[in-house]
Image: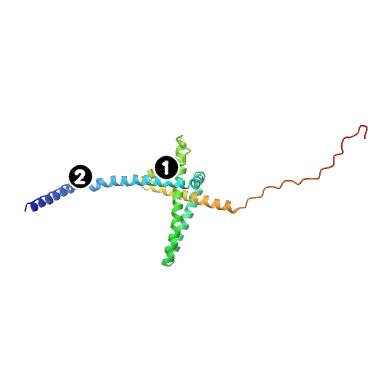
Amino acid sequence: MRSAIRASRAWGGGMLLATALRAAGDGGGRGLADVASPALLGVVLVLTGIGFASVSVLVQVVAPRTTRAAAELAGRTPWRSAVYGVLLTLIVVLGVGILQALPGPLRRLLAIALAGPCLLLVLLGATAVCHALGERILTAAQSPRMCSDVWAVGVGALFLALANLLPALGQAVGLAALLTGIGAVGRHILGRRRAAGTAPLPPPMPPPDLPRAPDPGPVPPGAP
């Protein structure tokens, strides 16, 4: 009997607490969920930015030459790299549309085979554009770490993560940066294959040895 009375009191206390919280939320215009959701969203965005920077630095450590070369292309000719990125994205979208028309087993097989290269291209492109942005930021700030590739990638990734906090504008900046990085990686890969397919010119041949005239020896005095 006593346990039933205690349970009823606890249930009644919980109901009163829930009613008080609901009334406070209705009266103040902002409930507990409204207060917690911005904080939770901020934590998620911060963790996403840290994860993005960590993955970018890891890709830079694994493939330093590719990201460095693509970053130079993205920094030197960003508009051309952006155009290449748009074209590559359209090719991928067209390929996805073609995959939808294929039979089930073949579609799954090709999707699995193409998922890896597409993901790798996105990771390399994001890392390359982070490298280019971070290098410019460190150079403008005259930082002693301006020559460090890892620091350049980390600073660029944090810059894009902070820019992503801006509504609409941040997402547009991130999308444009990603397309530029993807295009730069595509340009680097195509340029490397083109250079590998071009045969180097042979070295110039040395001139042939011409026969030398015999030495007449010393001229005697009084000779004409």
Could you say where residue 164 lies in the image, as x and y percent from the top left?
Answer: 38, 46
Q: What SS does tag 1 mark? A: helix
Decide: few, some or many residues near mark 1? Use Cα within 10 Å; few <14, some 14-19, many ≥20. many
Q: Report the disc number at residue 102.
A: none
Could you say where residue 172 lies in the image, as x and y percent from the top left?
Answer: 41, 48
Front residue (pair 146, 205):
205
Which amino acid is tagged 1?
A: Gly
Q: Report the disc number at residue 28.
A: 2
Which amino acid is tagged 2?
A: Gly
Decide: few, some or many residues near mark 2? Use Cα within 10 Å; few <14, some 14-19, many ≥20. few
Task: Say which label, 1 or 2, has the lower sequence index.
Answer: 2
Could you say where residue 192 lies in the image, as x and y percent from the top left?
Answer: 55, 51
Q: Report the disc number at residue 154.
A: 1
Badge 1 vs badge 2, beta-carbon distance below 8 Å: no
The reply, left or right, for residue 123 in relation to residue 202 is left
Find the residue positioned furthest to the top. Answer: 221
Looking at the image, is 92 positioned above or below residue 54? below
Q: Can you tell which quarter of the image residue 101 is in?
A: bottom left
